[in-house]
Image (cartoon, grey):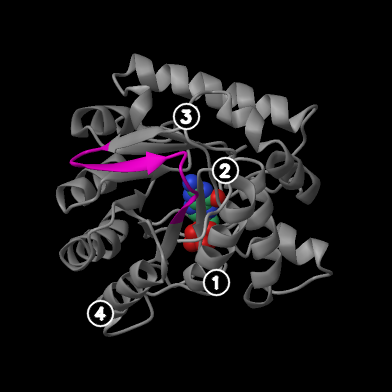
Amino acid sequence: MTTGQLVCGRRALRFGERTLVMGVLNVTPDSFSGDGLLTGPGWLDRVVELGRRMVQEGADLLDVGGESTRPGADPVPLDEELRRVVPAVEALRAAVEVPISVDTTKAEVARRALRAGADLVNDISALRFDPEMARVVAEAGCGVVLMHMKGTPKDMQADPRYEDVVAEVREFLAERLRWAEQQGISRDRVVLDPGFGFGKRPEHNLALVRNLRVFRELGCPVLLGPSRKSTIGVVLGGLPPADRVEGTAAVVALAVAYGVDVVRVHDVRVMARVVRMADAVVRGWKPR
Ligand code: HH2
C-alpha cells in the first residue's frame, strides 16, 4: 500500500501521506497507564475536554475504550461497558469532527457506539471474541482495526512463546483479514495491528516494531500502540508508566521510519510533534 483511503462510515481517513495520530481516551477507573477518566462525578465533561484538547494538539482520530486490557485484567460486564462508552461517544461526536473509534470486543458495545456516532471499531481480538462482531462491522460499513493477541488479557502474559514472532503475527493478521473479507468487510475498511504488548515479551515487541514493513505487505494501513507500555519500562530499567514518555517517543519515531500509518498514543501533544518531525525526515520536507 502506498497512499489510499480508509473508508469508515461517512468519514474517510487518508493514509500514506503522513503518519496519523490516534489519541487514547480510556473511560475506565483502572487503565495501566494511569490515564483512566472514570474517576467520579464530572467524568463525561473530562472526557469531552480531553478529546477536544487532543484534537487541538494534533490527534487525527480518537479511540474510546471502556474496558482495561492491561495484563491480568478481568472483563467488564456488558451493562457497565455500555454505561461508560455510549455517553462518551455521543458527547465526543457533538464536540469534535475527527473520526472516533470504539475500543471493544463486544458486538453490542460496538453497535451502540456506532449508533452514537463512532466511525471505527478497534477490536483487540480481531473479531474472534464475539461471534456477532463481524456482522455488526459488515452491516455498519465502518472501519475496523484487527489486532494480534496471543490468549486473552487475563492470561496473555503467562509465558508467551514464539518460534518466529514476526512470521506468526503476519500469518495471523493475513488469516483474520481473509476471514473478515469473507464476512463482507472489504479490505479498504481494515487497519492491521501487530499488538504491541499483547501476549509478547519485550524482545517480541521490539522485533515487531523493527519489522513493521512486513505487515504493510498485507495491503492495509498498519497501526501500532506502544504508548507507555511495560516493554519501555523494562528496557529503561524499570520505569513506571508516567516516566515512559521519552521511551514512547523513541518507539514512535522509529515506527514512522519503519512505515507505520497510525500511532495510538496517550500523550498527544508530545507524540504529534514527534510524528511530524519524524515524518519530515522520512518522507521529506519543503519550506512553505
Ligand atoms: N493497546 C491497548 C488498548 N487497545 N488497541 C490497539 N489496536 N492496539 C493497542 O496496542 C492497544 C489497543 C492498551 O492500552 P491502554 O488502552 O492505554 O490501556 P488499558 O487497556 O489498560 O486501558
Disc 2 marks which residue? 260
The image's mark for residue 45 is: 4
Q: Is mark 2 within 8 Å of ligand 1?
A: no
Sequence-first disc among 2 and 4: 4
Residue with the most extreme bottom position: 41
Q: Secondary structure at mark 1?
A: helix
Front residue of 173 and 286: 286
Residue placed under numbered mark 3 in the picture: 220
Please identify, in this view, whether the residue under mark 4 or under mark 3 is nearer the observer. Answer: 3
Which residue is drawn at the image coordinates 70% and 40% (left, top)? 208
Neighbour class for label 1 at 10 Å: few (<14), some, many (≥20)?
some
Badge 1 amino acid: Val
Name the side, left or right, on which 19 lies relative to 72: left
- The range drawn in magenta is 8-21
The mark lying in front, picked from 4 and 1, is 1
| Label 3 environment density (alpha carbons within 10 Å; few <14, some 14–19, many ≥20) | many
Q: Which quadrant holds the C terminus?
A: bottom left
Helix, strand or loop at mark 4: helix
**Where residue 205 sits in the image (x, y, percent)?**
71, 46
Determine which residue is flagged by label 1: 270
The alpha-carbon separation of the residues under discs 4 and 1 comes to: 23 Å
Q: Position of residue 99 (x, y in %)?
A: 28, 52
Q: Which mark is first along the chain, 3 or 4?
A: 4
Q: CA distance from mark 2 to mark 4?
A: 32 Å
Residue at 73% x, 32% y: name it. 165
The image quadrant of residue 59 is bottom left
- Percent coordinates x, y for residue 265 in the rendering: 51, 61
**Residue 9 point in image, percent of width and height:** 21, 39
Mark 2 / mark 1, whichever is N-terminal: 2
Q: Earlier in the sequence, mark 4 or mark 1?
A: 4
